[in-house]
């Protein structure tokens, strides 16, 4: 009898893990923007070419990394953000798995320049398909500048699975908007094929919404504010007259993290019952704050689904709060949908 089990080499393990974290260019965008935010950047630029197939670049003015950390960052399970599993229930960062950079580097050509504020000289690392090509000291500005080129160059199946440039760009813009709305006080820009799509300066939430969705939303916003023992809710819903047939402006953020929740979406829709025609959707930008111990973020690789301890109570509070706010704004039931 011979033994047949082997440990997979790191670059193979990383490539497999990448399957979960990196599904398309937008997943890379999400991970890199979140890293920039976690590094306390104030100004973050995203540059993409060919819907991110050719280039995804994120430049931040955050904390940067030491030379050793810059190398370590690409190891699997390498993170500066948690130390123990308990930390998962008291998270203050976007990242925590320490898998994104290792996964991305396993399936692309990556080049990173980074420098800490107190250092004279920074570091540049080039890594292709998980294999380090070079690491050199360089002069660069404070912060991190990471370029991800030729995504999935070594996984043709994944590359072929990508949709049209229009669709992939749409996914990138969705991710960009979610992060820009999570952090209105940070500046974000997005450039695609040398064309500036967004240039969002630091703002309050209302101004950020107007910058992202256009002037017409300004006078349609109804503020939401409620604070109970188990949840704080803030943000905006739009007036019933702004309801749209197409979805796309429905946003929940829980403890500064964009999440999807059909269940809570239903609560909002119910609050609008009889105010908008069925089949139309209110826009909403709702920021929920709950005790970190009452949610589990670690149930989905992209972290866009989370588990609440007391979902039913949240549902009821959310619905009542929005209903109340709509009432205050005289959004009485209308029989005539002439708008
Ligand atoms: P995670 O974000 O889950 O920790 P990543 O693989 O995304 O895992 O990043 C690994 C580590 O690299 C981070 O914990 C952080 O210390 C460092 N890092 C990544 N991106 C940046 C950045 N833009 N600026 C400073 N440090 C960074
Ligand atoms: Mg990360």
Image: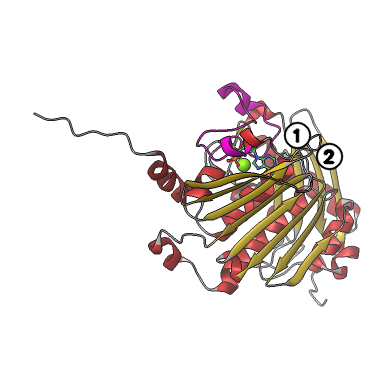
- Picture disc at residue 226: 2
Q: Are marks 2 and 1 in contact (CB under 8 Å)?
A: yes
In front: 324, or 7? 7
Q: The magenta stretch spans which residues?
A: 70-98
Counting from the top left corner in percent of width and height, residue 128 is at 49, 52
Q: Is residue 257 visible?
A: no
Tell me the quadrant of the picture where the C terminus can be found: bottom right
Spot the residue most to the left: 1
In front: 192, or 258? 192
State the SS at label 1.
loop
Mark pair 2, 1: CA separation: 8 Å
Residue 158 vertical placement versus 130 (above, below): below
Tell me the quadrant of the picture where the N terminus can be found: top left
Q: Is mark 2 within 8 Å of ligand 2?
A: no
State the SS at label 2.
strand
Q: Is residue 276 left or right of residue 124?
A: right
Inspect the magenta stretch and tell me whether residue 85 lies in it: yes
The mark that comes first in sequence, 2 or 1, is 2
Q: Which residue is mark 1?
A: 231
Which residue occupies 63% across, 67% down?
Answer: 170
Residue 280 vertical placement versus 267 (above, below): below
Counting from the top left corner in percent of width and height, residue 206 is at 88, 55
């Amino acid at each position: 009898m011979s033994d047949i089990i082997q440990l997979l080499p790191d670059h193979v393990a990383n490539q497999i893990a990448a399957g979960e974290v990196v599904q398309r260019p937008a997943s890379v965008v999400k991970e890199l923007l979140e890293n920039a935010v976690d590094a306390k950047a104030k100004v973050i630029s995203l540059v993409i070419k060919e819907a991110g197939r050719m280039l995804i670049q994120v430049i931040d003015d955050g904390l940067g990394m030491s030379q050793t950390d810059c190398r370590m960052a690409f190891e699997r399970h390498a993170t500066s953000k948690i130390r123990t599993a308990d930390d998962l229930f008291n998270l203050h960062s976007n990242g925590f798995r320490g898998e994104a950079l290792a996964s991305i580097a396993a399936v692309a050509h990556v080049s990173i320049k980074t420098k800490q504020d107190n250092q004279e000289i920074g570091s540049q690392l080039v890594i292709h398909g998980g294999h380090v090509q070079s690491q050199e000291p360089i002069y660069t500005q404070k912060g991190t500048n990471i370029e991800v080129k030729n995504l999935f160059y070594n996984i043709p199946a994944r590359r072929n699975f990508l949709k049209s440039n229009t669709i992939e760009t749409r996914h990138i813009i969705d991710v960009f908007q979610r992060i820009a709305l999570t952090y209105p006080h940070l500046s974000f820009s997005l450039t695609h094929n040398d064309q500036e799509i967004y240039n969002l300066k630091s703002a309050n939430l209302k101004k950020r919404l107007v910058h992202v969705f256009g002037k017409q939303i300004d006078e349609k916003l109804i503020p939401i504010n409620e604070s109970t023992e188990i949840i704080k809710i803030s943000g905006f819903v739009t007036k019933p007259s702004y309801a749209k047939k197409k979805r796309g402006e429905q946003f929940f953020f829980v403890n500064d993290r964009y999440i999807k929740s059909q269940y809570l979406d239903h609560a909002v829709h119910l609050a609008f019952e009889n105010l908008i025609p069925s089949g139309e959707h209110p826009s909403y930008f709702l920021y929920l704050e709950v005790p970190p111990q009452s949610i589990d973020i670690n149930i989905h690789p992209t972290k866009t689904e989370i588990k609440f301890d007391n979902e039913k109570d949240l549902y009821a509070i959310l619905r009542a709060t929005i209903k109340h706010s709509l009432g205050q704004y005289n959004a009485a039931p209308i029989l005539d949908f002439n708008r």
